[in-house]
Amino acid sequence: MTTTSYRAELYPICDLVSTLQGEGTWAGMAVFLLRFSGCPLACSWCDEPRHRDPQATRHLTPAAIVAEMRRLDPHLTHILLTGGEPLAVPGLFYLVDYFKDHGYWQAMETSGVGGEIPFGLEWVTLSPKTPLPEALFNRADEVKYIIGANPSDRQTEEIQERARIHDNVWVQPCSEATVALPGQSPINPQALQHCLAHIKRSGGRIRLSLQTHKWIGLP
């Protein structure tokens, strides 16, 4: 046991589903998607609006979350913590410890805003939306930038510079839909062109991340 006791906290959960990781390094891996409600940021292009809907939020204890995961898929042992913003969730360190003590491998995607990154995570995806301390980039196993239709010059130069000093940088075009409709792409075409330009300019140091789960209708 990494801790001897846990606080009986309730955690605001927007989604808890058995699915596939659709993005970045671990694309195609089976995971429990644990999406927290709430975020300190208010990105106009956020593609997960349900995390701001109080009606979509359940408040669950760590034991209740594990019980639900075992009901959904008793063989699956990988969890992706995302949001919303997981770092803004009170008691996150306790929840990570609880999952670890129950044998779960844990990855987290974060904007880097809201709090400290817990120990015990096997993988950290940093998706910057604001200026961040260099220590967060050093902790990140991968850095993933979301690219809009009209990216700023500042973001463009930051991404290229980051790719020169971090060996796992991705660009991902923003989406226009939560799922892909037959014959249609959920990707903003202008954003995709900016991503391709980044990749070519970087000489192979930047890779393209696509939300592949949306193409096959998964959450």
Image (cartoon, helix red, strand yellow):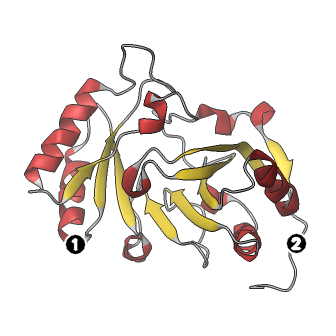
Q: Locate residue 138 relative to residue 13 in the image: left or right.
A: left
Q: Are marks 1 and 2 in contact (CB under 8 Å)?
A: no
Residue 158 is drawn in which quadrant?
bottom left
Q: Locate residue 65 relative to residue 25 in the image: left or right.
A: right
Residue visible at 70% across and 74% down in the picture: 100
Q: Position of residue 202 (x, y in %)?
A: 12, 56
> Pointer 1: what residue?
165
> Pointer 2: what residue?
7
Which one is nearer the viewer's eye here, 117 or 130?
Answer: 117
Whether residue 180 is visible to the viewer of this picture, yes or no, is yes
Which one is nearer the viewer's eye here, 77 or 163?
Answer: 77
Q: Amino acid at mark 2?
A: Arg
Whether residue 44 is visible to the viewer of this picture, yes or no, is no
Does dot 2 land on a helix, a strand or a loop?
Answer: loop
Q: Residue furthest front?
A: 75
Residue visible at 57% across and 36% down in the picture: 48
Residue visible at 65% across and 44% down in the picture: 18
Q: Relative to residue 107, is residue 83 depicted above or below?
A: above
Q: Position of residue 190 (x, y in %)?
A: 23, 27
Q: Relative to residue 4, is residue 24 depicted above or below?
A: above
* Number of the label disc, if any, that sits on residue 194: none
Q: Earlier in the sequence, mark 1 or mark 2?
A: 2
Q: Residue furthest right?
A: 8
Q: Locate residue 195 relative to residue 55 in the image: left or right.
A: left
Q: Amino acid at mark 1?
A: Ile
Q: Relative to residue 164, is residue 15 depicted above or below?
A: above
Residue 92 is drawn in which quadrant?
bottom right
